[in-house]
Amino acid sequence: MAADVSDGSLDLRGYDTVLEQLGEPGSRGLIATPALVCDFALLLENIARMADVTRSAGVALRPHVKSHKSAFIARRQLEAGAAGLSCAKLAEAEVIVECLRDDGYGRPFSVLLTSPLVGRAAAHRAANLAARCDLIAVVDHPDGVDELAAAVEAAGTELSLLCDVDVGLGRTGVTGATEAIALVERIDRCDRLHFKGVQGYGGQLQHIVGRESRRTATVESARKLRVVVDAIEALGFPVHLRTGGGTGTAVIDMDIGLLNELQAGSYVFMDREYRDALGSDPEGRFAQSLTIATTVISANQEGFVTVDAGLKAMATDAGAPLVVGHESDVEYHFFGDEHGLVTNDATNPFQRGDRLELVPPHCDPTVDRYDAIWLVANDVVVGVMDVAARGCSQ
Ligand SMILES: Cc1ncc(COP(=O)(O)O)c(C=O)c1O
């Protein structure tokens, strides 16, 4: 873990060398590669931009931790006015809550678990976590309500619940108003569970290329969610919270006005997949703050060089990364577990030892491959942040 190597007892992966040079010109060039590097100013700009845009639209922001898995960033998002945090899994939430407490973050904050929980053990953990933060969980099955009801009863805690609604992704969520109403009535029968609203996350919408197509599909998803909201309210249960959305639909969701809380995550870093989909659309106006630093380890071949970032250095579900500064004139190709191939010619005469930076194809699962992210300002390393919830997918 990054914490172990920074206390001076070990010098794995060259951490100590860089930490000794923290703040020194050229320290960026000392980072052992492959490594994740984040432009600190651009990160802060992205955090502030989404906070401002949502604030001006009168919509709450509950940024998704799954993109960064970092207590350092979560804290900055809360300090910028976030209504709370979204976490994909219990372990992610447990670790981030613990880290924020250890870091001395004293204000109460709310955490939404955006995936339904299954089984007594998970319900028990959620009930215990509810004692440490204002926890909200989503449910999409009556058994899930019963498991949580039993767990909070045993733990003596209370839990707010959202009905998860499938708005077209088909991943989780009830598929219609009848199932939603059955869940809400079940929640209402338990004193320690409180129905708070609905979640409608349209993951299938986020990367639709072209604003009009994305908008049309998002309007259709919102219509599905509205049918469920209206049915629940018609029975006399107020739907206070209507949460969902991501980086790709954020501005469209604000225009539609049904969601009163957005769960965007990727905007802090951005990635090639989002760059391709959003182009110059309003949703795409976030800076590429995250890159993968890599080194040319061999340049003996005609037409390409070999770099030290391969399949293990990034998620590959979204294709190849771009080479920063050479987005249109060179190509990266995967070259096995440990290596990549970068095309090379007379105009781009990369040499052994050159350092290149790559735009990650997909930021969330790429971040989960690293213990730490280096924070830089130009060629200076200004800090390092732990990917505290790395691997916390349970
Ligand atoms: C439930 C949920 N909400 C929000 C997000 C954040 O979306 P994005 O990273 O595209 O902003 C995700 C991402 O997968 C998600 O699964």
Image (spheres, rainbow, N blue to C red):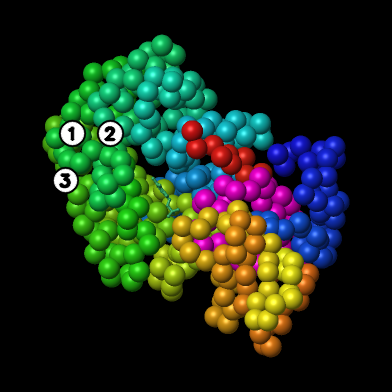
Instruction: Please name the residue shown 22% across and 47% down the image.
Output: 225
Say left or right for 336 vs 353.
Answer: left
Which of disc 2 and disc 1 is earlier in sequence? 2
Q: Which residue is mark 1?
A: 179
Which of disc 3 and disc 1 is earlier in sequence? 1
Say left or right for 43 vs 377.
Answer: left
Closest to the camera, between mark 2 and mark 3, is 2
Question: Range of the magenta residues?
Answer: 357-385
Instruction: Please name the residue shown 24% across and 64% down the image.
Output: 216
Give the quadrant of residue 344.
bottom right
As drawn, 377 above or below 148 = below
Q: Amino acid at mark 2?
A: Asp
Q: Position of residue 109 (x, y in %)?
A: 50, 34
Q: CA distance from mark 1 to mark 3?
A: 12 Å
Is label 2 in a helix, a strand or a loop? loop
Say left or right for 24 vs 226.
Answer: right
As drawn, 350 above or below 46 = below
